[in-house]
């Protein structure tokens, strides 16, 4: 594999930034559910932020295909680090943060995600040989989810602290020789901001040679965006596969930020360490998937493997909706991690092999925009009064089951045609 040093530094930067961002993104929903007890405010804000990313995601795709991906990482980290750092310092100054500033940090991080991850995959495709695409995507998944395990563990620690020398994490009680006070939300944000600064210096060290040099489209914004749309219009099978295989990811994002915190609080009647520990089990499943998915499904085509994973996670969602058992909850999150990570690896490798690198950013921006629309519909559904009554939030997982079957039907219908493209 060429550009090994560049890929190593890229992973290192992703680990450092992903750790602190992961803690923030776990802490913020829980802050609104448990600390200030205004989950409806967060849900409304999430809908608005998601709507804005519809436009930002389209624009981000044109930036990824037009400019140096390394420089784009640096610029985005400077902007996000400065904004979140300023909010954190203001929190220290006032010893408090208004709710809208907490939401602003969430929005900034979501906007960063919408350029960071598409840029990460585009950069990886740019500096990796085609024969190593599957391996690269597995590595990205494993390192990303290993970071999420650590983020989940630290979030559990920071959200609830350690009292009476007992650390509650992942459903276990661990005796330790010290106590730790739970962190304030602005203290979490300061740690987040510092990692942005560290990552900037890492990206400055990256040197690489592009594996394939393709023409960079330098037209205006509309013409560049149109190029991605026209490519997918001319390849309807790739479009259908890319859209359908993204549905589990759409539900997972909404589940993590909207469904999960209320599910833990109202249905399981558990505390922040259980909520944060869900991320640990999810990430452990994702790590296993990253290591094994290409080996386990090596004799199956991509579509068949994805169908198996979607059916499996549907059973997990059903179990979580029907049973108020902690082991079912943790097992469900483990299966969700395996399935979502496995689908993402298989999907991304397929897209890498069929979409040129100079169009990958814009093609992904089209998929992201459609994915955002699906997420907005689900967020709106979970904001309905029905899901606020007693423990009705658990029925949100039936929405997940329904979405998986709505995905499976067209995948089965297009099965042979997607397979025919994969073999070419």
Image (cartoon, rainbow, N blue to C red):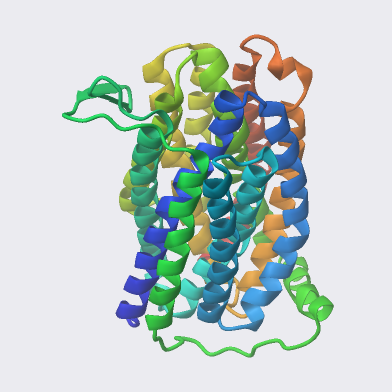
Measured as percent of width and height from the top left, residue 170 is found at 33, 28
Q: Nearer the viewer, residue 112 or 423?
A: 112
As drawn, which residue projects farthest toward the front? 93
Residue 271 is left or right of residue 6, and the answer is: right
The answer to whether residue 54 is left or right of residue 30 is right
Q: Nearer the viewer, residue 239 or 56?
A: 56
Q: Is residue 285 above or below residue 39?
A: below
Residue 236 shows in the view: no
Which residue occupies 48% across, 26% down? Answer: 316
Is 61 rendered above or below residue 37? Answer: below
Q: Nearer the viewer, residue 305 or 96?
A: 96
The residue furthest top is 390
- Residue name at image x 58 percent, y 61 percent: 420
**Which residue is painted at 53% across and 19% down in the image?**
265
Q: Considering the image in quadrants, where does the N terminus appear?
A: bottom left
Q: Nearer the viewer, residue 304 or 137?
A: 137
Quadrant housing residue 242: bottom right
In the image, residue 407 lies at what x, y percent? 65, 40
């Amino acid at each position: 594999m060429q550009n090994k040093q560049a890929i190593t530094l890229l992973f290192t930067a992703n680990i450092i930034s992903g750790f602190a961002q992961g803690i923030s993104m776990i802490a913020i929903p829980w802050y609104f559910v448990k600390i200030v007890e205004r989950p409806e405010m967060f849900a409304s804000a999430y809908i608005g932020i998601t709507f804005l990313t519809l436009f930002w995601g389209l624009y981000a795709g044109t930036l990824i295909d037009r400019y140096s991906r390394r420089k784009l990482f640096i610029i985005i980290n400077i902007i996000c680090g400065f904004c979140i750092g300023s909010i954190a310092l203001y929190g220290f100054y006032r010893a408090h943060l208004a709710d809208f500033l907490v939401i602003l940090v969430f929005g900034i991080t979501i906007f960063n995600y919408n350029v960071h991850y598409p840029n990460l995959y585009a950069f990886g495709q740019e500096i990796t040989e085609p024969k190593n695409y599957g391996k690269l995507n597995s590595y990205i998944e494993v390192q990303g989810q290993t970071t999420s395990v650590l983020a989940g563990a630290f979030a559990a620690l920071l959200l609830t602290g350690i009292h009476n020398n007992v650390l509650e994490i992942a459903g276990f009680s661990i005796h330790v020789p010290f106590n730790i006070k739970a962190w304030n939300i602005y203290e979490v944000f300061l740690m987040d901001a510092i990692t942005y600064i560290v990552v900037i210096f890492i990206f400055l060290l990256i040197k690489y040679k592009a594996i394939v040099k393709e023409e960079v489209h330098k037209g205006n914004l509309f013409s560049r965006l149109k190029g991605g749309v026209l490519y997918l219009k001319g390849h309807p099978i790739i479009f259908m596969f890319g859209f359908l295989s993204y549905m589990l990811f759409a539900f997972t994002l909404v589940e993590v930020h909207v469904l999960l915190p209320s599910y833990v609080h109202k249905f399981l009647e558990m505390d922040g360490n259980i909520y944060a520990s869900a991320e640990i089990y999810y990430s452990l499943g994702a790590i296993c998937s990253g290591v094994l998915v290409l080996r386990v499904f090596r004799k199956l085509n991509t579509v068949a493997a994805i169908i198996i994973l979607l059916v499996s996670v549907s059973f997990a969602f059903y179990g979580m909706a029907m049973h108020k058992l902690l082991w079912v909850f943790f097992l469900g999150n483990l299966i969700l991690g395996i399935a979502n990570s496995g689908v993402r690896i298989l999907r991304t490798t397929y897209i890498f092999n069929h979409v040129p690198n100079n169009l990958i950013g814009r093609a992904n921006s089209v998929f992201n925009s459609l994915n955002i629309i699906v997420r907005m519909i689900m967020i709106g559904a979970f904001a309905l009064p029905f899901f606020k009554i007693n423990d009705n939030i658990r029925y949100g997982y039936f929405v997940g089951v329904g979405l998986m079957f709505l995905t499976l039907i067209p995948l089965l219908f297009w099965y042979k045609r997607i397979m025919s493209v994969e073999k070419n």
